[in-house]
Image: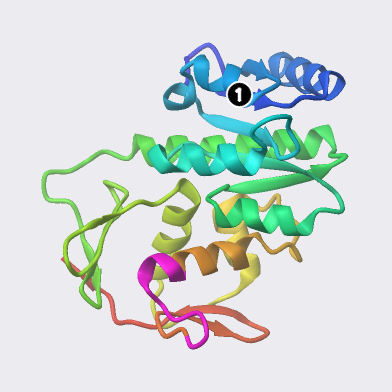
Amino acid sequence: MTNAATLGRIAIIEDDPGICDLVETLLTREGFEVFAFDNSGAFFAAGLPGTLDCLLLDLMLPGEDGLTICRKIRETDKRLPIVIVTAKGDPIDRIVGLELGADDYLAKPFNSRELLARLRSIIRRTQDIAAQPVQPMEERLEFLGWTLRPDARELRNPAGAHIGLTTADFELLQILVTHPQRVLSRELLIDRTRGGVADRVDRVIDVQISRLRRKLGDDPRNPTIIRTIRGDGYLFGPTVSRC
């Protein structure tokens, strides 16, 4: 979606004009094409979701809040990276946002360098995925009747039904499936999926693991597909065949 003259197309939904102006100015100065909105109605009326590289979404908004907007977008668009912005004391809303399909979060007040690092990392990873060529005889990774096609970013269940994956879902599942029966630390997963810009004690990876387990039908009380190795990380249990 990115215009060659910009680093990416970013939409901001933020009702605080001071914060919105500061972020818009910062991102524009850094070479991004920025679209700013103070409510969901104006954002959806602009028809931008399919053309964006990232959405920076405040959770506390008048009318439809950020959680509702995130849910609505994910009903039709699994690809668009969404970074939610929360007040520092709102861990529950943050986790709910991630459960609904957000890819990352920032807590207010955030540092401009951290914001830029998060956005550059997620846009770069999304563009890398989109740039992967689709081959006529693409590789398929199969486990327990499931099929993952990395080049098409497609997951199908044993019945053949397509399972929607966000950018974050896809990246995390691909790393797990391509390293079966190996313990992968949270630090490694953070580095591989979030460009090493995340706090090592945050819960984004844990929430994304829970999200993947639900999509795979893995019992959260006794998971066997993606197992928690307490104190060490996560392990993808099934045998994986390459076709």
Q: Which residue is mark 1?
A: 11
**Picture layout, residue 38 above or below residue 167:** above
Query: Who's the residue at 50% across and 63% down the image?
Result: 211
Instruction: Tell me: 227 left or right of 225.
Output: right
List the single residue furthest toward the top: 5
- Asked if residue 123 shows in the view, the reply is yes
Is 134 magenta? The answer is no
Left or right: residue 177 versus residue 2 is left
Residue 139: quarter of image: bottom left
Residue nearer the viewer, 116 or 63 = 63
Secondary structure of the magenta portion, mostly? Answer: loop
**Magenta stretch bounds:** 213-222
Residue type indicated by callout 1: Ala
Q: Is residue 216 magenta?
A: yes
In the rendered view of the protein, which quadrant contains the N terminus? top left
What's the residue at 88%, 39% (across, down)?
109
Quick check: 159 above or below 56?
Answer: below
**In the image, residue 121 lies at what x, y percent?**
60, 40
Q: How is the image coloured?
A: rainbow
- Residue neighbourhood size for the residue with mark 1, other residues' Cα within 10 Å, grouped as few (<14), some (14–19), many (≥20): many
Q: Is residue 68 left or right of residue 90?
A: left
Quadrant the C terminus occupies = bottom left
Q: Secondary structure at mark 1?
A: strand
Q: Percent x, y for residue 11?
A: 61, 23
For the point 67% across and 37% down, which residue is it?
65
Residue 197 pos. (x, y %): 70, 49
